Amino acid sequence: MKGVGGFYYVRPHHDINNVLFECKAKGIFRNKKIKPSVGDDVEFEITDSAVLTGNITAVHERKNTLIRPAVTNVDQAVIIFALSEPEPNFNLLDRFLIMMAMQGVSTIICLNKSDLKDASYGEEKKSIYEQAGYRVVICSTYDGSGMDALRELIHGKTTVFAGPSGVGKSSILNSLKPEAEVKTGNLSEKIKRGKHTTRHSELIWIKNDTYIMDTPGFSSLYIPDMEEAELKEYYGEFSLYSSGCRYNGCLHINEPDCKVKLALEEGFISRLRYDNYIQLYNEIKNRRKW
């Protein structure tokens, strides 16, 4: 469920009381260069049932392993951004979406704090990302809107929750599982950015087979190694028009008779998303020169 200071906290399967055993990993893991990770299915032996301690003896094969956040056996991700306080950084959102897609993890976008913004703003951003093929939920822990939809989407799955600090991630977790009592933080008054309240990744049992992975907030992300020509494949809305481009492998930047750029000019593709694409393309291209 979590790992802190060399100790690993393990919840026995189907334990409705959510009892955690404080375990150490046997030396055999160090020899094999295996380190237990949040989300792992493990076997452990109890060393003291009175104080709930034990030793992890085996780590089962992982379905997947994410690098950032560092968790395993994920079914899906929910990326949480606030519509206000702090203002959303959609370039950062696109980076996370690309990272999850590269790791084969489907992602739901949660736009939180809808009570702080005019409804039309949230609906506009929702439309942009739905056009790109993503499921988008607009919610508010203040008035409870959108929370039922989010509960339905995470039901029966192991979902990693991620996002920048201060977007209300911990408040959403507390709404979904009040007894989790996840610590919340305030925005920095000076820079209107969130303060980190989650220090490590932790798996939170909601009910039955529903789990949420709470992860530390982030303020920057670097796209892993890829060819700049690959980037366009991660912008799903481009595929609606790219087959009409004059050139196979059109990058949708400087080529003539580009249907993606035509769709952009006619308002069928979001300028926000396209500008993010250009910025990320140039970042990848220039990085590869070094």
Image (cartoon, rainbow, N blue to C red):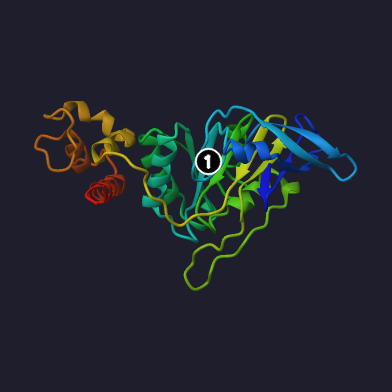
**What residue occupies the far bottom of the structure in this picture?**
190
Expressed as whole percent of the image width and height from the top left, the position of residue 190 reads 49, 73
Amino acid type shown at disc 1:
Val
The answer to whether residue 77 is left or right of residue 37 is: left
Decide: is 175 above or below 47: below
Expressed as whole percent of the image width and height from the top left, the position of residue 30 reads 62, 41
Residue at the disc numbered 1: 78
The answer to whether residue 82 is left or right of residue 40 is: left
Expressed as whole percent of the image width and height from the top left, the position of residue 237 reads 31, 34
Q: Residue at the spot x=28%, y=45% of the render?
A: 277
The answer to whether residue 191 is left or right of residue 278 is: right
Name the foreground residue: 33 vs 58. 33
**What residue occupies the far right of the structure in this picture?**
50
Decide: is 187 above or below 287: below
The answer to whether residue 190 is left or right of residue 157 is: left
Location of residue 40 (image quadrant)? top right
Q: Do we see residue 149 in this rendering? A: no
Q: Residue at the spot x=68%, y=41% of the render?
A: 1
Name the foreground residue: 191 vs 158. 158
Q: Residue at the spot x=61%, y=31% of the render?
A: 157
Q: Do we see residue 111 in this rendering? A: yes
